[in-house]
Image: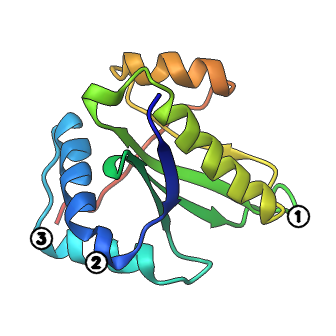
Amino acid sequence: MSDLTIRPLVAADRPAWDQLWQAYLAYYETELPGAVYDTAFERLLSGDPHEFAGLIAEQDGVAVGLTHYLFHRRLWSIEDTCYLMDLYVSPDCRGGGVGRQLIEAVHERAKAAGIPDVYWLTQEFNYKGRMLYDKVATRTPFIKYAKRDPS
């Protein structure tokens, strides 16, 4: 594997982040208004410990992956937990360990914050992603439900 660096997002990453996040959303057949992109990126850079944070993976200086995560409380333990919300690797870099290293980087940040576990959700049809997830984590029996205001 070429030189891979995983680091926190910075303001100068916005163009590369836009491309990666658009590709991630396209994979899930989703489009969002520009204002959501702006707000999301501001939140990722806020530095607020109760807000999302982001990491970017660069291979030979080119952005090839990203992840977003959130530390939050839960009532079933004293320690917080970590929700890995988004994980994306450029198609031409998949299978090379980038996704695994992004997951591990989030896990290391959680561990450094005294957080013992990281969890995430994925679509059932994300077979390639699930092949990796089955190797690095334990699948849980939970089923997600969502209720949205119809207005």
**Other-residue count near label 2 (Cα within 10 Å), few / some / many at <14 / 14–19 / ≥20:** few
> Which of these two is toward me, 121 or 145?
121
- 90 in relation to 127, above or below: below
Q: Residue at x 15, y 59 (%)?
A: 32
What is the tally of numbered marks visible in this picture? 3
Residue drawn at x 51%, y 52% as measured from the top left: 6
Q: Amino acid at mark 2?
A: Thr
Residue 68 visible (yes or no):
yes
Q: Residue visible at 35% across and 52% down?
A: 61
User: In the rendered image, which quarter contains the C terminus?
Assistant: bottom left
Q: Residue at x 26, y 43 (%)?
A: 24
Residue 40 % position (x, y): 32, 71
Q: Are marks 2 and 1 in contact (CB under 8 Å)?
A: no
Query: Circle 2 sits in a helix, a strand or a loop, which is it?
Result: helix
Q: CA distance from mark 2 to mark 1?
A: 31 Å
Q: Is residue 115 left or right of residue 89?
A: right
Q: Amino acid at mark 1?
A: Ile
Q: Quick one: SS at disc 3?
A: helix
- Residue 78's mark? 1
The amino acid marked with disc number 3 is Gly
User: Does residue 4 lie above or below 38 as drawn?
Assistant: above
Separation of marks 2 and 3 at Cα, in angstroms: 9 Å
Q: Which callout, 2 or 1, points to the residue nearer the camera?
A: 2
Image side of residue 12 versus residue 119, left or right: left
Residue of label 2: 39
Secondary element at tag 1: loop
Left or right: 19 as drawn, with respect to 101: left
Residue under circle 3? 34
Measured as percent of width and height from the top left, residue 142 is found at 60, 31
Q: CA distance from mark 1 to mark 3?
A: 38 Å
